[in-house]
Image: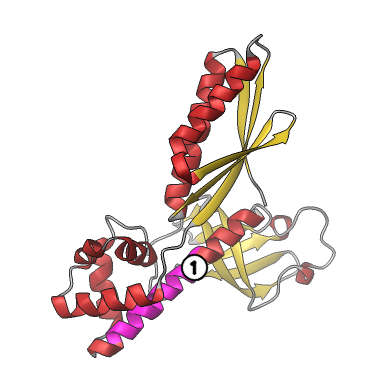
Amino acid sequence: MLLQKKGFPEEDELVICTVTKVQFHSVFANLDEYEKSGMIHISEVSPGRIRNIRDFVKEGKKVVCKVLRVNAEKGYIDMSLRRVTETQRRKKIDEVKQEQKAEKILEFVAKDLNSDVKQLFGDISNNISKKYSSLYEFFHQVVVDSDAIKDAGVDAKAAKKLEEAVKSRIKEVGVKVEGKLKLTSFAIDGVDIVKEALKRAMETGKESISIKYLGAGLYNVAVNAKDYKEAEKILKEASEKALEHLRKNDGEGEFLRAEA
């Protein structure tokens, strides 16, 4: 990857790693997005008793971990495999694949311009870092809005080549996130209160949100958006609107993150 993040990862951050060494009670891995390595204790590899740690991890395997503790002074990073849900794992892998795709596009443009790819990457990253969280997010915005190419801060020739390459290789596709709302009301007009709560959730997400009744007061909430950042924001706002209305009317509710 062209992008190597500086410093240390944050606690609870999801990181993609390459396993370098497997020992009896621990696993060591390099963090692909940082020039750092970390350790996974056997108790954090998988739930339950582990007879053979190599049944779960082997040298060279790519894994998604959650950062548990960071000691920057000593250079220690403790991580967990078992605390990463399947949904989180898929999301992280998708994000990495998207960024790798964006970097390939940049490599193509640099070659076409007879430029140094790392220099071009650095120039563009410096210009977009405050507005976009990743190169792919920037490229996706270019697909949606041609004026966004100006954010790259490169000359007209490079901007034109970059826009052409991005639009020919990235299509305007979206992502989907899901969660569950558990809504309960003991009021006489409880059914109407719940309906109004769901209506407020739907109004928040407009066309991007769908709600399906699962039974026993449980509702699946699905949000489709252009990227995970926007999808998560809509899901959070919609759920909060529903729960706020319910609680104001003597009801009970909670939001449950979908784990698979």
Residue placed at 48% from the left, 62% from the top?
A: 75
The quadrant of the rendering that contains the N terminus is bottom left
Residue placed at 50% from the left, 56% from the top?
A: 175
Query: Closest to the observer: 4 or 42?
Result: 4
Residue placed at 43% from the left, 55% from the top?
A: 226
> In what element is the residue under mark 1?
helix
Q: Where is residue 146 in the image (x, y as percent from the top left)?
A: 25, 65
How crowded pointer 1 is (Cα within 10 Å; few <14, some 14-19, many 20+) is rated as some
Q: Does the stretch in magenta take in 101? A: yes
Quadrant of residue 212 within the rendered picture: top right
Query: Closest to the observer: 200 or 161?
Result: 200
Residue placed at 60% from the left, 18% from the top?
A: 192
In magenta, the rendered stretch is 95-110
Q: Tell whether 195 sits left or right of 36.
A: right
Q: Position of residue 229 (x, y in %)?
A: 43, 50
Circle 1 sits on which residue? 96
Q: Tell whether 243 sits left or right of 53.
A: left
Q: Is residue 147 above or below residue 3?
A: above
